[in-house]
Image: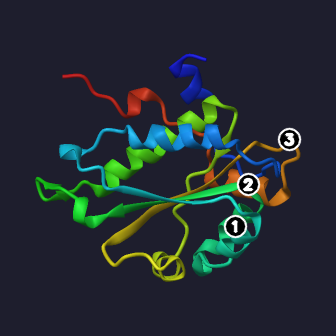
Amino acid sequence: MNFIDLVTTRHSVRTFLPDPIPKEILQEILEAGRLAPSAQNRQPWRYIVFTDPAKIRELAKKTGLIGLSNFFIKDAPCVIIACADMKKNVRINRQDYYLVDTAISFQQMMLCAHSHGIGSCWLAAFSEKALAKYLQLPRNWRIVALAPFGYESENKSMYGKVLSAFAGSAQRQPLEEMVSYR
């Protein structure tokens, strides 16, 4: 699959098969994140990977009240939490780059996963405070996002359908609305 096909066909997946991701593919996904560019090559990203079904179900309960909207992660065979080590942050033009850097890295992981037929869903609905406490993160780490990863089930849950419709994931603005040539 060429790159434009990869980004065109990638979509948010909210209903997963229970099949685990093979270790070598999970390693490749993580490696794709490791190889991402970052401001001044600081590489602030840190990843916490859950593959144990019982631990994933417990994690789903620890995302805070706002995180309950993403309770579907309990059924994913893998959940990855993208964090940033603020000691690795660089500030340029009054802007912190840990968010940008970690987002680029996480997106590379999602595209790599998709190239293997593995779906994911970028999630920002969680209580950072509650989740950081549960994970016992170092004080200098920030949680940027989390995502379930797994093979997509053809039998979409009603909950997954509602969330997808609410998010408007399939709607894209025309290129003409975002680009100007000078």
| Badge 3 amino acid | Glu
- Work out whether 15 lies above or below 132: above
Q: Is residue 19 visible?
A: yes
Residue placed most toward the observer, 23 or 169: 23
Q: Which residue is mark 3?
A: 154
Mark 3 vs mark 2, CA separation in Å: 16 Å
- Ranked by sequence position, the earlier of labels 1 and 2 is 1
Residue 58 is situated, as x and y percent measured from the top left of the image, at: 70, 76
Callout 3: SS: loop
Q: Quadrant of residue 84?
A: bottom left
Q: Which residue is mark 1?
A: 56
| Extreme residue in the right direction | 155
- Work out whether 9 lies above or below 98: above
How crowded is the residue under tag 3: few (<14 C-alpha within 10 Å), some, or many (20+)?
few
Task: Left or right? Give the position of 91 relative to 172.
Answer: left
Q: How many marks?
A: 3
Q: Which residue is mark 2?
A: 77
- Give the residue displayed 76% in from the left and 64% down from the top: 53
- Give the residue displayed 71% in from the left and 63% down from the top: 52
Could you tell me if the residues under marks 3 and 2 are in contact, i.e. CB atoms within 8 Å? Answer: no
- Give the residue displayed 70% in from the left and 33% down from the top: 117
| Badge 2 amino acid | Pro
Task: Left or right? Give the position of 101 relative to 112.
Answer: left
- Give the residue displayed 58% in from the left and 80% down from the top: 64
Callout 2: SS: loop
Q: From the image, which quarter does the N terminus lie in?
A: top right
